[in-house]
Image: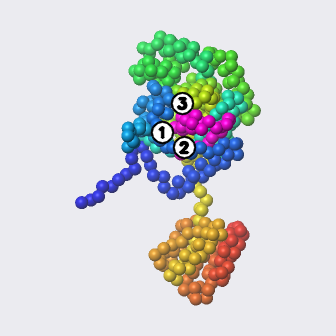
Amino acid sequence: MARPLFRAPVGTRDILPPESARRRRLVRVFADLAERSGFGRLESPVFEEIGVFQRLGPANDVVTKELFEFFDKGEPPRHLALRPELTASVCRAFAEHRPTVPWKIWYSGPQFRYERPQAGRYRQFDQVGVETLGTDDPHADVEVIGLGVRFYEALGMRRVRLLVNSLGDAESRPVYDAALADYLRSRRDELSEQSRVTLERNPLRVLDSKREQDQTVIAEAPVMADFLSGASAEHFAEVRVGLDSLDAAYEISPRLVRGLDYYTRTTFEFVADALDTAQNAVGGGGRYDGLVEELGGPPTPGIGFALGVDRILLACDAEDVFGGDPAPVQVFVVDTAGGQSAVVICDRLRQAGLGVDRAFDSRSMKAQMKRADRSGAVVAVIIGTDEQSDGVVTVRDMRPGGGQRRVASAHVVAAVTDLLAKGVP
Ligand code: HAM
C-alpha cells in the first residue's frame, strides 16, 4: 500500500537552502543594527497563556479568529495559544521580571495567525522587531522608527515608504472615537455590509477597510489630528522634528489605523511600493502606553515595531536587492584515492576557519570536479592515487586563468590560504 505523502500544513512553508541562508543573513543585519543601538535580545516562549493575547483587544480579528489555541495535558488543562505577535509577550515578560527602564529589547522568530493564506500572507511567518519600555520620550519614538528606516536602507531597499500618524492618548482618544462613530453611523447606509458590522464592534477599524464602496465615507471621516489633546499634539510634533533631523522621509497618514487595538499616540507603517497593495505592509508599530498595565504590570509606556521577514524578502526580490549569499564554500576537496585523505584535509581546513565541502561515495574524478564547480568554491584540493603515494596534494585555482601546483600535504592550509588571499589571478 502506498504510504501517504505528507506536505507542510496550509499556510506554512519549508524554507530550503540557499533561501534559508539569506533569511539568516537578514536577521543578522537586523541584530547588528539593534545591538549597536543598545537593544538586547529577548527570547520568549512561542506559546503563552491565552489571556496574554486576549489583552490585544477582545474584538480584534487576531484574537477572535486567528489564534492557534490549544489545551495542554495539565490537571486542570491550561488554555494556551501560539503567539500571533511578540509585543504582548514582551510586555508580559516586563511585568513578570520588572527590569530597569528603559528596557530595550529586540527579537526575531515565527508568529502564527490563522489567516487566509496568499502571496505574502502565511499562517506561520517570521518577524524581527524592537520594543522600548519605560519611557514616553518622543526621542525614543524617533530612535525606534529611525532604526526601521536604516534597516531597510541596509538591505538596499529604495522603495519603502514610511507612514506616520498619532492616535491620541487616554484623554483625546475617547472623544475622537465617539465623533468617528457618530459620523460613520450617520453614513451607515453607504458603507459595505462588512464595515457596518465592524462599525458596531470597533468604529476605528472601519478606516482600515480597503473595500471600494467604503472609500468616499472614509475619505470624509473626521481625522484624529483635529482631536489630539495638547500633550499628544506636542508629542507628535516632537516626533516629526526628530524624523526630519534624521532626513527620514515620511508621510503623515491621518487615517492610518493599525491592525491591533493597543496603540496610543505614535503609530507608523512601512509600505513597500514594489509589492501588491493587498500585502504591501512590510512592517509597522507604534506606542502602546497601556499594555503593560493591562498585563498586570505597573503603568509603563512602550513603543516598538515588528517587520515581516517574508514580505521584506519578497520586496527585495521585486527590487532586485539583497540577493544570494556569496557561496560559503571556498574550498572543495576532491579525493579519488579512497576518501580518507579528504576526511583529514577537510577537518584541517575547517579548523583554519575556511568554508570547505567534499564529495562522497568514491565518485569518479570527473563527477567530483563537477560537484566542485557547482559548489562555488574558489579552490579545489585534489588527491589522486599519485598524489597520495607522493605525500602531496594538488591545489587548483578554479577562477578563470587560475593555475595549479603540488604542495606537501602538511602545507595544505598555508597553500590554500595564500591562494585565497591573492584574489583573482
Ligand atoms: P502587525 O502589523 O500585525 O504588527 O505585523 C507586523 C508585520 O508583520 C506586518 O507589517 C507584516 O509585514 C508582517 N505580517 C503580519 N501578518 C503576516 C502574515 N500573516 N504573513 C506574513 N507577514 C505578516 C505587529 O505584529 C505588532 N506586534 C507590531 C508592534 C510592535 N507594534 C508595537 N510593537
Query: Going by the image, does 410 lie left or right of 179?
Result: right
Q: Position of residue 73 (x, y in %)?
A: 38, 43
Q: Can the viewer see residue 110? A: yes
Find the magenta span and give its range: 84-109
Number of on-image labels: 3
Q: Residue at x 35, y 53 (%)?
A: 6
For image coordinates 58% across by 34% down, the residue present is: 95
- Label 2 sits on a secondary structure element that is loop
Counting from the top left corner in percent of width and height, residue 151 is at 65, 43
Magenta includes 59?
A: no
Confirm whether residue 315 shows in the render: no
Three-letter amino acid code at the position of disc 2: Ser
Secondary element type, mark 1: strand
Horizontal arrangement in the rendering, residue 58 relative to residue 44 (left or right): left
Q: Are marks 2 and 1 in contact (CB under 8 Å)?
A: yes
- Is 88 magenta? The answer is yes
Q: Which residue is mark 2?
A: 44
Q: Quadrant of the N terminus?
A: bottom left
Return the residue at label 1: 48
Q: What is the three-letter code of the residue carrying label 1?
A: Glu
Looking at the image, which is closer to me, 317 or 171?
171
| Colour treatment of the image | rainbow
Residue density around tag 1, few if under 14, some if 14–19, many if 20 or more, within 10 Å: some
Q: Which disc, if any, is residue 295?
A: 3
Pointer 3 local density, CA inside 10 Å: few below 14, some 14–19, many at least 20: many
Viewer-closest of 175 and 161: 175
Mark nearer the N terminus (2 vs 3): 2
Residue 191 vertical placement versus 77 (above, below): above
